[in-house]
Amino acid sequence: MTSPAPGMAIADIEAAARRIAPFVWHTPIIRSPWLSSLTKAEVWLKLEIVQTTGSFKLRGAVNALAILAERRRGVTGVVTASAGNHGLAVAWAAKELGLSTRVYVPSHAPPIKRQAMTALGAEVVETPSYDAAEAEAVSDARRTGLTYVSPYNDDDVIAGAGTVALEMFSDCSGLDTIVVPLGGGGLLTGTGVVARSLRRDAWVIGAEADASPVFTTSLASGRIVAVDVKPTLADGLAGNLEPGSRTFALVSELADRVVLVAESSIELAMRDLIGRERLVAEGASATAVGALLQGGLDLAGRRVAVILTGRNVDAQVLQRVFGRG
């Protein structure tokens, strides 16, 4: 990584950290003897799984909605699209700030996430796929005048997500490698901006589900390419990019490497995180650990932080994963 990211600065992320501090947990980062031994590195796990809504998404949602409330007096509500965690985070933030929320979700969105959104007062609208959810949410915003809050294609959401990395570098000295689950690219972008500012030579590695290889395919083509998204345990990472998403250029600039993670590796990571670390992680979260388990990263001698992004997984999914193990 050699040049500054276009349109994004660490000052924006530091401002986001101050803005969201009353609403979010400063989550712990713990050393993993198991992964350290496996990779011959020092591996640390950043536990966003204990965040208030069960995922890092709360950071971006709170930052974006707080700024919206400050800048647009009289705003009454927002609309978004989500595979689950972003919608849940927006619903939570909106309730805190007195706003209404409508969330478009794909049919495969886990019931545990839908139920949590509804419990917070959000209107949940089901669509056939994530791509359809995103398109319908954008159309809704244009039709109704509500503000659309993208899960990733939004500078304020990205800045909030980047606060995860601020905490990691503050709490764990000498980090030189960050492994980030990669879906829409907001978390990797925020992480990359922080890493580039605080340790220019740090590696930032995106872990993408093999069932939804959006960035792998698009980066190889030099432009955003739509892919055939297959069923995956990493439902939170599945889906194509919004046309023109700013995260494509940002990930292209900031990521040192993007690796595809096999479905079998994601499943194994979910099992081993519980069996070896007593940590529950949903498939999207476990994808970063899966990247370490399947090998090929050559992390020996490095100080590595892996972001466990969320815990919101249905009990039936866990039972199925363990049953196959």
Image (cartoon, rainbow, N blue to C red):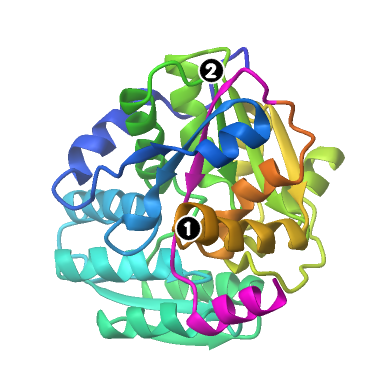
Q: What residue type is labelled 1?
A: Pro
Residue 281 image point, x, y percent = 49, 61
Q: What residue type is labelled 2?
A: Pro
Q: Residue at x 38, y 50 (%)?
A: 48
| Location of residue 174 (image quadrant) | top left
Residue on which disc 1 sits = 151
Looking at the image, residue 122 sits to the left or right of residue 139; the answer is: left
Image: 107 above or below 9? below
Location of the C terminus (image quadrant): bottom right
The stretch of residues the image draws in magenta is: 299-325
Residue 126 seen by the camera: yes
N-term-proximal mark, 2 vs 1: 2
Label 2, residues with CA under 10 Å away: few <14, some 14-19, many ≥20: some
Magenta stretch holds residue 318:
yes
Residue on which disc 2 sits = 4
Magenta stretch holds residue 16:
no
